[in-house]
Image (cartoon, rainbow, N blue to C red):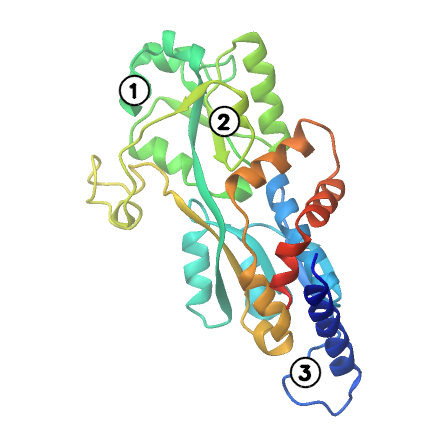
């Protein structure tokens, strides 16, 4: 790291400390209160959030991590009880995010740099039992549904969804597309992928929610089901699509993973506000870190610490 960068970062931290110490400082002064970043229930989000938190600590801020429900957190962000959410996925969180930003109490701080994909996924070996895949219409066939069934759902197939808190409209999609499947939700992110590992090793039937960035699409051979392409009208207008009486008769949206904050962040912690806006990371980086935690047994803290050490020139620019 160059000396000039070090001095600039040190100068920023000292200036922040000085501003915080002045009782009569101008309205632009930075608060000494802790910035509350939300934690959810999947590994990537824990990594993203703690990366941002550690960068803010390097700039001299006090940081607090708060466990929060993915969708219900917006109430806390609107009230200012929570301050920053580092991952709102276009695929599942866009509606809640738009409703919250429309109040003026929550601000979209831009993309994280990661691109989100979340969809129904099956192992490659299941194509022999349901040869019409990846076309979604293959799932309507009785034989195909039975191929994906388990004792608890037979003769219907089982779709293993993510935790209920993730949203995603899977039950609505099953009903709208008249699929002979029952949606069963995994209790946790870890349970979801533990079941995939078990089924894959036995070549047992499984159809489940897979998302990227994640290690699973790289580790296991398989495909995403190809549903009718998502449009906004599909989620809002029942007359759109193959079922004129129901919404959600299409696939899930693809797109950005966003950062959002309480709208008061920019006035209370202007430097932190700019640092969070500057934060960016890509799918490959995140996939490697998730793999290090979930497959290699490293702790989130260890993985975050390694990234911080290896990328100091990069994150130091976020807090200049």
Camera-side residue: 290 or 236? 290
Q: Is residue 83 above or below residue 188?
A: below
To which residue does mark 2 refer?
217
Q: Which residue in the protein does label 3 denote? A: 29
Seen in the image, is 102 located left or right of residue 48?
A: left
Mark 2: few/some/many CA within 10 Å (<14, 14-19, 20+): some
Relative to 52, is 286 above or below? above
> Which quadrant of the figure contains the C terminus?
bottom right
Report the Cα–Cα distance between label 3 and label 2.
46 Å
Mark nearest the camera among 3 and 1 is 3
Distance of label 3 from label 1 (alpha carbons): 61 Å
Q: Which residue is mark 1?
A: 140
Label count reads 3
The image shows residue 252 at horizontal and vertical percentages of: 37, 39
Instruction: Specify whether 225 is left or right of 319.
Output: left
Q: Earlier in the sequence, mark 3 or mark 2?
A: 3
Instruction: Classify mark 1: residues with Cα within 10 Å, few (<14), some (14-19) or many (20+).
Output: some
Residue 184's disc number: none
- Direction from residue 269 to residue 185 in the image, left or right: left
Q: Earlier in the sequence, mark 2 or mark 1?
A: 1
- Report if the CB atoms under discs 3 and 2 are less than 8 Å apart: no
The residue drawn where x is 56% and y is 21% is 196
Residue drawn at point x = 65 percent, y = 55 percent:
313
Residues 113 and 297: in front is 113
Quadrant for residue 131, please give it: top left
Q: Secondary structure at mark 1?
A: helix
Identify the secondary structure beneath mark 3.
Answer: loop
Q: Dividing the image into 4 quarters, which one contains the N terminus?
A: bottom right
User: Among all residues in the image, which is located at the extreme front?
Assistant: 3
* Image position of 203 with respect to 307: above or below: above
């Amino acid at each position: 790291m160059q000396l000039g960068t070090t001095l600039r970062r040190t100068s920023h931290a000292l200036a922040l400390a000085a501003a915080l110490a002045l009782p009569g400082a101008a309205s632009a002064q930075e608060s000494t209160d802790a910035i509350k970043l939300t934690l959810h229930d999947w590994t990537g989000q824990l990594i993203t959030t703690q990366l941002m938190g550690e960068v803010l600590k390097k700039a001299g801020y006090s940081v607090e991590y708060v466990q929060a429900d993915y969708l219900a957190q917006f109430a806390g962000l609107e009230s200012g009880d929570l301050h920053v959410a580092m991952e709102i996925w276009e695929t599942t969180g866009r509606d809640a995010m738009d409703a919250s930003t429309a109040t003026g109490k929550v601000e979209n701080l831009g993309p994280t740099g990661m691109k989100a994909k979340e969809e129904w996924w099956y192992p490659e070996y299941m194509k022999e039992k349901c040869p019409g895949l990846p076309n979604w219409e293959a799932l309507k066939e009785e034989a195909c549904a039975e191929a994906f069934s388990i004792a608890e759902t037979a003769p219907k197939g089982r779709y293993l969804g993510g935790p209920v808190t993730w949203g995603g409209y899977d039950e609505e999609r099953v009903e709208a597309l008249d699929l002979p499947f029952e949606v069963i939700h995994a209790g946790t992110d870890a349970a979801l992928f533990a079941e995939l590992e078990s089924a894959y090793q036995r070549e047992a039937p499984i159809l489940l929610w897979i998302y990227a960035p994640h290690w699973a699409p790289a580790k296991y051979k398989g495909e995403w089901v190809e549903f009718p392409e998502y449009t906004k009208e599909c989620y809002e207008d029942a007359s759109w699509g193959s079922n004129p009486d129901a919404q959600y008769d299409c696939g899930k949206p693809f797109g950005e993973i966003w950062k959002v904050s309480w709208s008061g962040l920019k006035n209370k912690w202007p430097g932190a506000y700019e640092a969070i806006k500057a934060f960016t990371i890509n799918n490959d980086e995140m996939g490697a870190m998730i793999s290090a935690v979930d497959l290699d047994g490293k702790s989130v803290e260890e993985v975050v610490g390694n990234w911080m050490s290896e990328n100091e020139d990069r994150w130091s620019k976020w807090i200049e």
